């Protein structure tokens, strides 16, 4: 796994020093983590344990998780990963989160487009997929801007903390649909 540079971001391996900004910007923020579908980390120490888990995973084959670093500030503002990689079938699924203070600025789209390009150009994927809940409108906008196509919906897939259920909507891009990173 290599670093990826975009116009405003550096996507790189996590470092232990990322724990404090990760906690402050996203891992400790309920509005980010609950929308992302992950637990809210209560302390920098707990976030540090998460970061160490990410770092240890780099020793495994098919481990692709990047810290999203805002180039101008050097701040860790989120993370993006191919969390599900199937080398036999040449597909992987993207997940990401961006801190609240950095949302609505195109960072998620910029990072996602870069990781899609990495998947097709460096890993040799045939298909990149992503899923989202219908209530996550910001992510739906990112998915649309990145050129994903709808594949279908698994109804009432997620049971939310308040007990209601939400669908899981799947989207993908195939290698022959990929436009070679246009717009990055």
Image: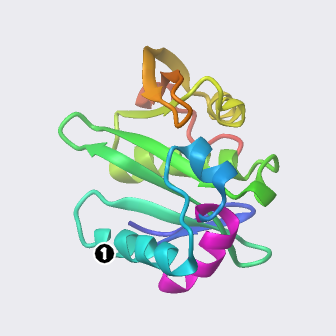
Q: Residue at x 41, y 76 (%)?
A: 49
Tell me the colour scheme of the image: rainbow
Q: Examine the rendered structure and indicate whether residue 149 appears above or below residue 100.
A: above
Which image quarter: residue 36? top right
Q: Position of residue 177 (x, y in %)?
A: 50, 25
Q: Is residue 131 left or right of residue 55?
A: right
Q: 166 or 51: which is nearer to us?
A: 166
Compared with 15, 176 (above or below) is above
Furthest-front residue in view?
Answer: 162
Residue 86: name its quadrant: top left
Give the main secondary structure, helix, strand or loop, of the magenta stretch: helix
Residue 125, image x, y percentages: 34, 40
Q: Is residue 24 magenta?
A: yes
Residue ID at (65%, 36%): 139
The magenta region covers 15-27
Q: Which residue is mark 1?
A: 56
> Would you call the spot at circle 1 few (<14 residues within 10 Å), some (14-19), or many (20 or more)?
few
Hey, which residue is sitting farthest bottom in the picture? 17
């Amino acid at each position: 796994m290599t670093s990826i540079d975009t116009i405003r971001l550096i996507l790189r391996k996590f470092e232990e020093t990322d724990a404090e900004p990760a906690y402050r910007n996203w891992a400790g923020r309920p509005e980010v983590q609950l929308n992302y579908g992950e637990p809210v980390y209560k302390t920098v120490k707990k976030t540090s344990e998460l970061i160490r888990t990410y770092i240890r995973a780099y020793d495994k084959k098919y481990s692709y998780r990047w810290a999203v670093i805002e180039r101008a500030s050097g701040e860790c503002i989120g993370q993006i990963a191919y969390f599900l990689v199937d080398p036999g079938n040449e597909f992987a699924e993207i997940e990401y989160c961006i801190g609240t203070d950095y949302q609505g600025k195109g960072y998620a789209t910029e990072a996602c487009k870069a990781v899609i390009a990495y998947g097709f150009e460096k890993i040799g994927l045939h298909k990149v997929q992503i899923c989202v809940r219908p209530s996550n409108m910001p992510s739906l906008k990112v998915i649309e801007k990145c050129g994903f196509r709808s594949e279908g919906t698994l109804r009432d897939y997620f049971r939310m903390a308040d007990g209601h259920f939400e669908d899981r909507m799947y989207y993908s891009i195939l290698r022959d649909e990929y436009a070679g990173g246009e717009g990055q």
